[in-house]
């Protein structure tokens, strides 16, 4: 240890130590000279002595860096091109990692994120991502492992003079204080005041809403606004950096105990049913406790609660906890179902995205590698001199590699800038919440430095070795570099092609009519409407709708196409468990959304034990047989199949199964029905009239009106972004590969001018000359294409879940990509190759 | 001169008192009846190494020619190292002698 400190002291004072040593040697020389003794080379001695301290590598490194810097300055063209290429390759990777960092690695900007845990319901029979409010309250009251429990429920509220409904969150009163939020005006929710009995209704505004709607009015605190026609006092405004625990940006926060006051017929605070809205629950662990300990306690608490409410709490219900303070935990929508939860489908897609951006880096490095190699070959004389003076191979390689390292670091810096811009643009386009900050934090910077290193190794190490070994031809290395670029571009082009084809297919017919249909969701269940009242409401609305001009058909369903709800239930058919999507409908449903009836008959009034199954469900449940007349069992009731409907991708565009089962809606289903209207006119015009009709029937209900056309477009957006970005990346890779090949062809032509001149003088035809020049590139390009093909096939297996309706080996995409690549590269390389033809034999031979 | 022996000789020579670099070389040369000649190219790197290990420290002093020069002095750690190396050397020397005598 002491030795290390002594070394450090030497490093810090090395100039003084050096001088002292020089003094010693000077003295020794004098004394030796007096006695006529020979003395060695002082400088060499000093160097050898210095080596003992072990810091010579710093000297060498700074030497190399300074030389590299001078070299780069002397050839600004090369430096600029190299840094540009690197910044694209590294920048794209940094943008992707930055996004990953924001979503997964970086905790939300709340107080003490490490102790926040998100709880969901889980049991052998099913799962739910939200808890009923009464269950949360029970757990909160009896838990000793959690120091605080937070819960929230998203909702929409109408404010007077506002056209569109506002996004609101009903939260427990400790929400803001637990998350460590500060108010930018007034105060935030306070557990002692806002959750007490008889507390007055208050609301906290979001910063953005306060600015846009109230013009940042400084006297806002204390004013009263009317929400859902009820007066509520504004107590304050949250700060602009407040993130909450979700990715949406609500405009209002209200205490959850005020839910019944604001929402008519609200059952939120008392409803135990799993179909109710429920609340998302987070807990804060007491210091020193693990999530496991909290899970154990909650499990036993749930069992205790089940004793009093056996129908509402599941048997063996457990509440597993996950780290709560990350963007990924905030994403999941409310859903529940039986069976096991789907494993996170985002992980393979994220891995695929990572692989794709690394390919861009590979293409960039391949390109740069050829450039570095060419430059190294041009410096043959300098290298030879250095070797002659006594530089070993290792030393020379280190020097050349240091130059690449410098380039790599410059590329990292440029890449950080580019990555930030790209990420900023992505977030602006996709409407990310305002508190998400794309500025690079320490993880992103570390990643950038590491990538710079990696890039330097990829493009600098092998050329360094080649140059030092005096391999001037280095054809194999060149060909490998070209091959790598070709492979990378190929993979990207193919994947882009697949995504574009998917986009085409997804925008096509999903199996039901969406353009002319409008959905009206009154959420009667959430307003506490009993079935009889709900039926009356739905019937009245439907009859009024029939009277409107332009309305062709009216119907209703419990799980309408492209709605926000998905229900999956496992049922038994002939002894096997199959997952289906049940839907309770009115008989006119199929006609309204134009789902064809392929066999059998439609549901009719009185068909209480009948079911219509979709084609996929028929194939899955009764393969090879005619399902009409067969039976299936759901919730201990037997149903007979009376008809088969066409597949409709109602849940999500990529729903391969579309195993729908349609039951006749009965009285119990009424509170959850959604009305669907098919119009022959423009659906937008209908939408505005609908609001007034609903209000006329029952002013307490404000239904959510949605054009199915709009929902469909929104579903497509993910694929659109994907196809667009990958296409962009593929074009960049294609451009880089073209540049690489063009450069090399030009170089080959210039090197072989003499040979070409002789051949032409001897009568070679132009096509023959071209063939000679291009022949050396055919092999690496073909090999690269094959490798790229293989890589694309492998990657597309992961892509399969995003490729709805398009096979992962779709020939159009593959052929199109390869064709595009070959055509572009061939065309591009014709330009320098043409120069071979313009060689004038006489002057070429004479000039040499 | 075997490489390990130089450090041993330097430490031994410094046991009687601090010396500057030239004096160390002179002392070794004369004490060995002019058989062992320490080259500067070996002496100074060796001195740097034992400085690094903390067995000697360098301090300024006046030479016999009235010049300011650094004197190297043995530290307690150096003394311990010297004892250890001396006993090692003794044992190795005995062993070699035994083989040469009887083999």
Image: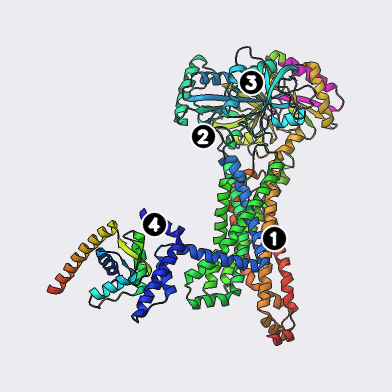
Q: CA distance from mark 3 to mark 4?
A: 64 Å
The quadrant of the image that shows the C terminus of chain A is bottom right
Circle 2 residues within 10 Å: few <14, some 14–19, many ≥20:
some
Have a look at marks 1 and 3 and say if they share a chain: yes
Q: Earlier along the polypeptide chain: callout 1 or callout 4? A: 4
Residue on which disc 3 sits: A255
Residue under circle 1? A735
Q: Quick check: is A682 in the magenta stretch?
A: no
Question: What colour scheme governs how the chains and residues are painted in the rendered image of this protein?
Answer: rainbow
Q: Which is more foreground, mark 3 or mark 4?
A: 4
Q: Which residue is mark 2?
A: A114
Circle 3 marks a residue in which chain? A
Left/right placement of residue A306 relative to residue A715 reads left
Q: Is residue A464 above or below residue A614?
A: below
Viewer-proximal residue among A144 and A472? A144
Circle number at residue A251 = none
């Amino acid at each position: 240890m002491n030795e290390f400190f002594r070394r450090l002291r030497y490093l810090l004072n090395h100039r003084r130590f050096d001088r002292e040593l020089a003094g010693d040697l000077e003295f020794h020389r004098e004394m030796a000279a007096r006695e006529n003794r020979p003395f060695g080379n002082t400088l060499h001695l000093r160097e050898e002595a210095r080596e003992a301290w072990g810091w010579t590598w710093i000297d060498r490194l700074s030497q190399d860096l300074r030389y590299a810097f001078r070299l780069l300055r002397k050839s600004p063209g090369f430096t600029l091109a190299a840094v540009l290429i690197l910044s694209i390759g590294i920048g794209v990777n940094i943008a992707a990692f930055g996004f990953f960092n924001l979503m997964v690695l970086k905790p939300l900007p709340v107080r003490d994120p490490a102790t926040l845990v998100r709880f969901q319901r889980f049991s052998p029979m099913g799962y739910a991502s939200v808890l009923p409010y009464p269950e949360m309250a029970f757990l909160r009251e009896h838990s000793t492992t959690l120091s605080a429990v937070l819960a929230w429920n998203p909702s929409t509220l109408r404010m007077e003079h506002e056209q569109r409904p506002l996004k609101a969150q009903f939260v427990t009163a400790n929400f803001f204080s637990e998350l460590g939020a500060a108010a930018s005006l007034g105060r935030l929710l306070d557990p002692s005041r806002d959750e007490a009995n008889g507390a007055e209704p208050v609301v906290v505004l979001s910063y953005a809403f306060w600015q846009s709607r109230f013009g940042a009015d400084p006297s806002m605190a204390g004013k009263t606004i009317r929400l859902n026609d009820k007066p509520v006092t504004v107590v304050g405004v949250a700060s602009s950096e407040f993130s909450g625990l979700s990715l949406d940006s609500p405009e209002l926060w209200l205490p959850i105990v005020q839910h019944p006051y604001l929402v008519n017929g609200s059952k939120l605070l008392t409803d135990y049913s799993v179909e109710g809205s429920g609340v998302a629950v987070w807990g804060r662990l007491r210091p020193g406790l693990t999530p496991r300990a909290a899970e154990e306690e909650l499990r036993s608490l749930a069992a205790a609660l089940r004793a009093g409410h056996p129908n509402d709490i599941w048997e063996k219900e457990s509440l597993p906890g996950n780290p709560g303070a990350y963007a990924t935990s905030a994403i999941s929508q409310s859903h529940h179902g039986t069976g096991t939860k789907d494993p996170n489908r985002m992980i393979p897609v994220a891995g695929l995205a990572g692989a794709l951006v690394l390919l861009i880096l590979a293409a960039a490095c391949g390109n740069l590698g050829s450039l570095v190699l060419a430059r190294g070959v041009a410096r043959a004389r300098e290298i030879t001199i250095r070797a002659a003076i006594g530089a070993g191979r290792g030393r020379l390689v280190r020097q050349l590699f240091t130059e690449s390292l410098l380039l790599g670091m410059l590329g990292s810096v440029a890449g950080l800038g580019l990555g930030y811009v790209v990420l900023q643009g992505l977030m602006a386009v996709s409407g990310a919440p305002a508190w998400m900050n794309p500025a690079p934090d320490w993880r992103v910077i570390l990643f950038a430095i590491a990538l710079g290193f990696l890039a330097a190794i990829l493009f600098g190490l092998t050329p360094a070795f080649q140059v030092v070994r005096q391999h001037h031809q280095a054809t194999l290395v060149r060909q490998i570099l070209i091959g790598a670029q070709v492979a990378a571009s190929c993979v990207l082009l193919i994947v882009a092609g697949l995504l574009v084809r998917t986009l085409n297919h997804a925008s096509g017919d999903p199996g039901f009519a969406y353009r002319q249909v409008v959905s009206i969701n009154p959420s009667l269940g959430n307003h506490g409407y009993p079935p009889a009242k709900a039926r009356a409401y739905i019937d009245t609305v439907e009859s009024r709708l029939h009277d409107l001009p332009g309305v062709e058909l009216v119907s209703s369903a419990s799980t309408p196409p492209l709605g926000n709800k998905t229900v999956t239930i496992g049922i038994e058919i002939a002894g096997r468990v199959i997952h289906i999507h049940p839907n309770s409908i009115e008989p006119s449903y199929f006609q309204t959304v134009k789902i064809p009836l392929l066999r059998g008959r439609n549901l009719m009034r009185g068909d209480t034990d009948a079911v219509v199954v979709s084609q996929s469900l028929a194939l899955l449940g009764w393969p090879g047989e005619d399902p009409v007349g067969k039976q299936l069992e759901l919730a201990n009731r037997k149903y007979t199949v009376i008809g088969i409907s066409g597949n409709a991708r109602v849940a999500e565009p990529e729903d391969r199964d579309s195993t729908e089962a349609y039951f006749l809606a009965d009285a119990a289903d009424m509170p959850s029905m959604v009305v669907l209207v098919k119009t022959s006119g423009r659906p937008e015009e209908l939408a505005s009239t609908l609001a007034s009709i609903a209000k006329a029937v029952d002013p307490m209900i404000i239904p959510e009106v949605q054009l199915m056309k709009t929902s469909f477009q929104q579903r497509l957006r993910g694929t659109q972004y994907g196809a667009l970005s990958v296409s962009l990346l593929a074009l960049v890779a294609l451009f880089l590969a073209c540049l690489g090949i063009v450069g090399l062809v030009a170089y080959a032509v210039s090197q072989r001018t003499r040979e070409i001149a002789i051949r032409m003088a001897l009568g070679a035809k132009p096509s023959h000359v071209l063939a000679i020049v291009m022949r050396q590139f055919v092999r690496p390009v073909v090999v690269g294409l094959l490798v790229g093909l293989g890589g694309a096939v492998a990657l597309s297996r992961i892509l399969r879940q995003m490729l709805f309706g398009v096979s992962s080996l779709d020939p159009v995409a593959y052929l199109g990509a390869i064709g595009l690549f070959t055509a572009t590269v061939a065309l591009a390389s014709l330009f320098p190759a043409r120069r071979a033809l313009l060689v004038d034999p006489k002057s070429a031979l004479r000039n040499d | 001169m075997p490489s390990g022996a130089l450090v041993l000789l330097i430490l031994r020579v410094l046991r009687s008192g601090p010396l500057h670099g030239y004096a160390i070389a002179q002392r070794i040369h004369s004490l060995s009846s002019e058989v062992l000649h320490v080259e500067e190219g070996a002496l100074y790197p060796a001195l740097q190494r034992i400085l690094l290990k903390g067995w000697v420290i360098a301090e300024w002093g006046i030479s016999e020619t009235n010049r300011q020069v650094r004197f190297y002095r043995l530290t307690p750690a150096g003394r311990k190292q010297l004892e250890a190396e001396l006993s090692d050397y003794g044992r190795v020397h005995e062993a070699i002698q035994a083989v040469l005598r009887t083999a």
